Amino acid sequence: MIRIAIIGMGLIGTALGISLRSADSKKDPMGEIEVIGYDANTDHLKEARARLAIDKMAPSLAEAVKGVHLVVLAVPALALRDVLATLAPCLEPGAVVTDVTSTKGQVTAWAQELLSANNPFVGGHPMAGREQSGPKAAVHDLFKGAVYCLCPNVNSPPESIALCEAMVERVGAKTYFIDPYEHDAYVAGISHMPFLLASLLVHVTSQASSWREMSALAAGGYRDTTRLASGDVTMHRDIIMTNAEAINRWIDVCIDELQGLKSEIAGGNQAAVQEYLQRTKQARDEWLKQKPGMRPGEAEYEDMGMGMVERPSLFGRRAGGRSS
Amino acid sequence: MIRIAIIGMGLIGTALGISLRSADSKKDPMGEIEVIGYDANTDHLKEARARLAIDKMAPSLAEAVKGVHLVVLAVPALALRDVLATLAPCLEPGAVVTDVTSTKGQVTAWAQELLSANNPFVGGHPMAGREQSGPKAAVHDLFKGAVYCLCPNVNSPPESIALCEAMVERVGAKTYFIDPYEHDAYVAGISHMPFLLASLLVHVTSQASSWREMSALAAGGYRDTTRLASGDVTMHRDIIMTNAEAINRWIDVCIDELQGLKSEIAGGNQAAVQEYLQRTKQARDEWLKQKPGMRPGEAEYEDMGMGMVERPSLFGRRAGGRSS
């Protein structure tokens, strides 16, 4: 049996527990599992248990990781350093540590600094979320079909990577292997700039003196473009602080573009504005058309030959060597 | 019977026809109507007829408005001047002209310049849309519950305003009276900046050298924040060109804000970033909580005493004087 501890019973931690536990253990290569949950907020912990996200509630961080093979850290990015420092001496030898936060460079560095060589760290980032936060917002299919980044480093033992990959498959997501720093540069553009621009739009409009009247006219376009501005404040703050450099490079690019666009508009350059809109519409429509199986990265994943056939024996070995 | 001509069988024109014709004429104060459609693109015109958006297809602009009480211009904003110039000599005396475009200052000026004093112009703007365009994208409930701006001027005869208002109610939308220039300043913020920022985000990311890899990680947040970038290019271009000044003022505000945010991030000012995100989350959540009946403008509308009771007699008069 594989024992998994989830630290942090927010949206992602709780949804992960629900997804892991609702999978069919007879069919899934991971087989029988036990999920232990911990959250400093006992209301969240109880809610997660009530939603069947975990088998057991742990009374402390140290208790949560006792006899555990895989520790999933689902806490805000800036809390990770303290959690890693507290956990490090309590981990079983060989226990694998992963996380679910949206930036991977900083946490990888902290793991390298704080964890023993016996405890491999494989950073993780499921590309899924909701604007609501907390355990009550967790849904069982949050990860279904989602891309799930895993960031092993050169020293990660293959079985630690395979264990994380098995977890990703069990929740219905697709593994995407990527370097932590490359990951941070990419997600700054396609994940962090979206919530930053959503917040920007809400900020500039809601601070305007005519907001009261203006807000009456705001409709579906405003709602959707700003959806991410209703997301978890702590999570977004931590993402910004741990990915500051990459985000600021993107802000510069946006400012440049806005200045260029502004002068085309002021100059009445209808053709340039049309071309700008045409090009972006085309780029987005092409992105939307990418079938899940056709996205870059997924083809590479298929080519890596890390198919399901290898796993039963792997977990057979692990289970024999570690539990029972 | 009220005869209505819809000029332009795109998304909005077709959806308007479908909504008008599918209402119950026995219960609606407007009573029996006939909808005549025209589009220079005959495929669009035939599609609109096939979708029961119109009773008759007109072979020309001039034919479309013959014997018509209300003309709805549903063409792109920059096409409006030519359409108004062509239509002006063909309109019945007293026929009311309205439009559905997203900017109201420019079209109001053109109407004043080109229409005879016999033909009142009441600009209109339904706050509803989809990112798909064309008659095939039209749905019957596009306007249900939507705010629908009407921009009469001081010279608009009350019955011309009442006729437009009756049309708005018939399609299930809520009238919001507003000055055309005030309208343009407001919608620049809550409607035009959203698609401009959506396009900006697609532009900067899709032009990046790592777009191919990056795009594999883009998920629901990217999809929703950029939804409007897949909208109709001509419509968006025309909106930008006819509302250039207001839009450029908003671009300046955004650039200022981005510069401020960038220096807070670079300075590691965690509290300032948190406060920024907190304030915008709160503003958006408050906006979402406004019940339809509680939005500013709707209360004023109730107070104007332009309830349904006045209408049957009004249309009785109109019908007697104009048709049969």
Image (cartoon, coloured by chain):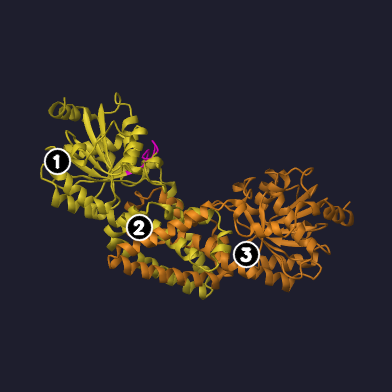
Chain colours: A yellow, B orange
Q: Do residues under tags 1 and 3 come within 8 Å of each other at their CB atoms?
A: no
Question: In the rendering, which numbered label is found on residue B77?
Answer: 3
Q: Residues within 10 Å of mark 2 (few under 14, many from 20)?
A: many
Q: Nearer the viewer, mark 2 or mark 3?
A: 2
Q: Is residue B198 above or below residue B143?
A: below
Q: Which element type, helix, strand or loop, lies under badge 2?
A: helix
Question: In the rendering, which numbered label is found on residue A90?
Answer: 1
Q: Nearer the viewer, mark 2 or mark 1?
A: 1
Q: Residue at left 62%, top 48%?
A: B142
Q: Judge from the rendering whether residue B38 lies leftward or rightward of residue B132; answer left or right.
A: right
Q: Which element type, helix, strand or loop, lies under badge 1?
A: helix
Where is residue A261? Give x, y as percent.
46, 70
Predominant SS of the magenta segment: loop
Image: magenta residue range:
A139-147
Which quadrant of the view contains residue A36? top left
Q: Do residues under tags 2 and 1 come within 8 Å of each other at their CB atoms?
A: no
Q: Nearer the viewer, mark 1 or mark 3?
A: 1
Where is residue A10? Give x, y as percent.
34, 44
Q: Residue at left 23%, top 50%?
A: A80
Name the residue that disc number 2 marks: A189
